[in-house]
Image (cartoon, coloured by chain):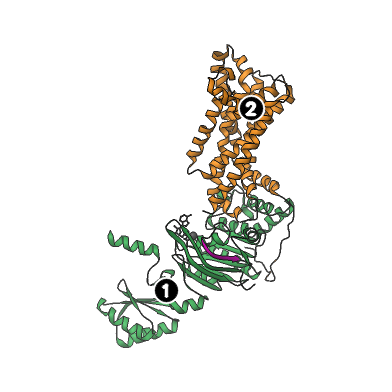
Chain colours: A orange, B green
Amino acid sequence: MTALASTGPRPTTTWNTTRGPLGQSASMAARSLASIKHYPAQLVEFFMIPLMILLSITFFMGGQMMGSWQDFLQYAGPTIIAMGLFFAITSTGMGLYGDIKEGVFDRLTAMPVSRFALLAGRVAADMVKHAWALLVVGAVAFAIGYRAEGGAAGTAAAAGALLLFLFAVSWTMALVGLTAKSEEQIQTWMISLLMPLAYTSTIFVEKDTLPGPVQWWAQVNPMTALADTMRMFLGGGSPGAETLALLAWCAAILAVFVPLSLRAYRRKLTN
Amino acid sequence: MKHAIEVRGLVKSFGEVRALDGVTLAAAPGTVLGVLGPNGAGKTTAVRVLSTLTSPDAGTARVLGHDVAAEARKVRERIGLTGQYAGLDPNLSGEQNLVLIARLLGASRRQARQRAHELIERFDLAHAATRAAAKYSGGMRRRLDLAASIVRRPEVLFLDEPTTGLDPQSRGGLWEIVRELVAEGTTVLLTTQYLEEADQLAHAIAVIDHGRVIASGTPSELKQTVGGLVLRLSPTRPEAAEQLVQLAEWAAGASARREDGAVVVPVAHAGEAQAVMARIGQAGVDLAGFGLHEPTLDEVFLSLTGHRTETDHQQKTKELTA
Ligand SMILES: Nc1ncnc2c1ncn2[C@@H]1O[C@H](COP(=O)(O)OP(=O)(O)O)[C@@H](O)[C@H]1O
Ligand SMILES: [Mg+2]
C-alpha cells in the first residue's frame, strides 16, 4: 500500500463539468453495455429471437398464408421483425431488477446523481441493443429479398418509428422490473401486455378481417398506429393520422410510466 | 458546527421489527465514531438512514448540519458510502468502476481517469486495474469499494462493517487507509462487530443492541465499564470453583462469574490479574490453567446487558433443546 504522507488538511476536488441528467444517463448506459466486452456472445443473443421469429414464420407459415413466402415477406416482414423485437423489452425489466439487487445501486443512490439517469441509462443501453438487432435482422430480410418501396429514407423512418415505440414501452418494463417480486413475473408481464396488443392490431392482419367489437379497439390500438406508420414509411408514403396517433401514444406512455417508474424506484430504496 | 453527524431519537421499523428504536449518536468533525453491535443490532439500518437511502419513521439525523430527509441532496454532495455489501459493478473493471463514479460526479473524462489512477495506486490495485471486479478477491474488492466511496473526497464517510470476513493482513491494510483519511480531516462513521476494530480506530464508540444505544463513550471509558481485560481461571477440582469466585472478586473488586467449569473475572490491567493470581496462590487453590485476554464483543455485551449476543444466545438455546 502506498503510504500517504499527507496529514494536513483534506484535499478538495473541484469537478464542475456540467453534466445534467442526459450526460449521466449516457455514463450509465455505457456502464450497462460494458458487459458486452466481457461476454461478446451477447451480440449474437440480442438478435437471435427476432431473427428466428422472422425466418420461421416466413418460411414455414408464409407460403400457406399467402401462396408464396416471398409475397408474405414483402407484406408482413417488417411487422414480424417488430414483433420479434418486442420480446427483447424484458431486458429492461430484468436489467433494473438485477441492478437494484446489486450493491452498486445503493452507492449510486447515495450520490448526487439524477434518479432519472439511473433508470434512463438502462433504457438507453437497451435501445442500443434493439437498434443492433434491428440492423442485423433487417439486413437478413433484405438479403432474402425484402425490398421497401420507400427506399433507404423510408426504411430509416420506419426503423425510427419502431425504435421510438420500443423506447416508450421499455418504460412499462422498467416499472415492472422495479416492482416485480421475481424474474418470472417480468416475463409474464411482458407476454400478457404485448400479446393481446399485438393480436388485436394490424401487426399481422388487416383491420377488416377482425371481428366487429375488436375492430374498434384495433383502430385505437397503439400497435396499429405503429404497424400503419411503418407500412406508410416503407411504402414511400407521407406521414398522416397514423403517425400522429403513434406519437401521441408514445408521449402518453412516457408521461405515465416515467414518473411511475421513478416513484417505484424511490419506494424500493426507502422501504 | 459542533457535530459532523448528529442523530436524535431515530426510529425505523420494518413491519414488526424495530430496527432502530430511538438511536442517539454524535460525531465531532474529523473523528471516527465506531458503532459496535452484533448481527441484527440495527447498524446497517442506521448507516442507510444517514446516507439518505432509507427514510426514518421518527427522530432526526443531520450530517454536516443538513437533515438527511429534508436535504438529502445536500447530504449526498458531501458523503461517501461503503455499504456492507460491495457497491461495485461486477461487470466493470476496477478502473471502469472508479471512472464511472467520477464521471457521474462531474469529472471530465481526463479528470476521471486521473483520479481513478491515483486511487488504484493508493489502494494497491494496479495489478488488477483492468480486471472485472467480479474476479477480485475479498480483500481487493473491499479496497476497491472503499476507493469508490472516496472518489470525490467526501467530508463524511460511512463504512458498514468494512473488514468483516477479511484476513488479519487485509484488515490491517484497511485500518491504515481509514487512519490516513481521518488524518486528512475526514469524519468517519464505522460499524463493526469487533471490539478490537472499534478500539483501534474509533475516538468514540456507541454500542448498540436491538436498535438501542446501550453504552457509549471513548474506548477507554467503555473498557473501564466492562473491565479492560478478562482473566479466566480453571480450577483442578471443580468443587474449588466457588472458592475461586470469592477470591477473584475480593482481589479484583469486580463480580466474577462461572462459565463452563471455569471462573471469569474482569480486571483493569495485567497487574491486577497478577494480584488475583497471587491471592489464589496464597489460598492454596490449584489451577489446571488460566488465561488473560481482551474482552470479546460477547463479553462486552454480557457485562452491559446481562445477556449474550443474539446469535450466541440462539445457538445456546438450540443446543439446550437439541
Ligand atoms: N429491509 C428490511 N426488511 C425487513 N427487515 C429488515 C430490513 N432491514 C433490516 N431489517 C431487520 O432490522 C433489524 C436490524 O437489521 P440491520 O440494520 O441490518 O442490523 P445489522 O446491520 O446490525 O446486522 C434486523 O432484525 C433485520 O432483520
Ligand atoms: Mg449490517
Task: Kindly identify which numbered label has been placed on residue B54.
Answer: none
User: Foreground residue, B169 or B166?
Assistant: B166
**B126 on left or right of B302:** right
Instruction: Using the rendered image, report if marks 1 and 2 lie on a common chain.
Output: no
Task: Pinpoint residue A11: horizontal percent, then vertical percent.
Answer: 70, 65
Where disc 2 sits, the SS reads: helix
Above or below, B76 against B6 in this view is above
How busy is the neighbourhood of tag 1: few (under 14 within 10 Å), some, or many (20 plus)?
some
Q: Quadrant of residue B67?
A: bottom right
User: Foreground residue, A237 or A141?
Assistant: A237
Q: Pointer 1: what residue?
A: B304
Q: Quadrant of residue A168?
A: top right
Q: Pointer 2: what residue?
A: A225
The subunit letter for the residue under badge 2 reads A
Q: Is mark 1 within 8 Å of ligand 1?
A: no
Looking at the image, which residue is at 49% across and 41% down? A183
The subunit letter for the residue under badge 1 reads B
Residue B61 within the magenta-colored segment of the rendering: yes
**B154 on left or right of B40:** right
User: Foreground residue, B239 or A106?
Assistant: A106
Task: Pinpoint residue A132: horizontal percent, then vertical percent.
Answer: 65, 33
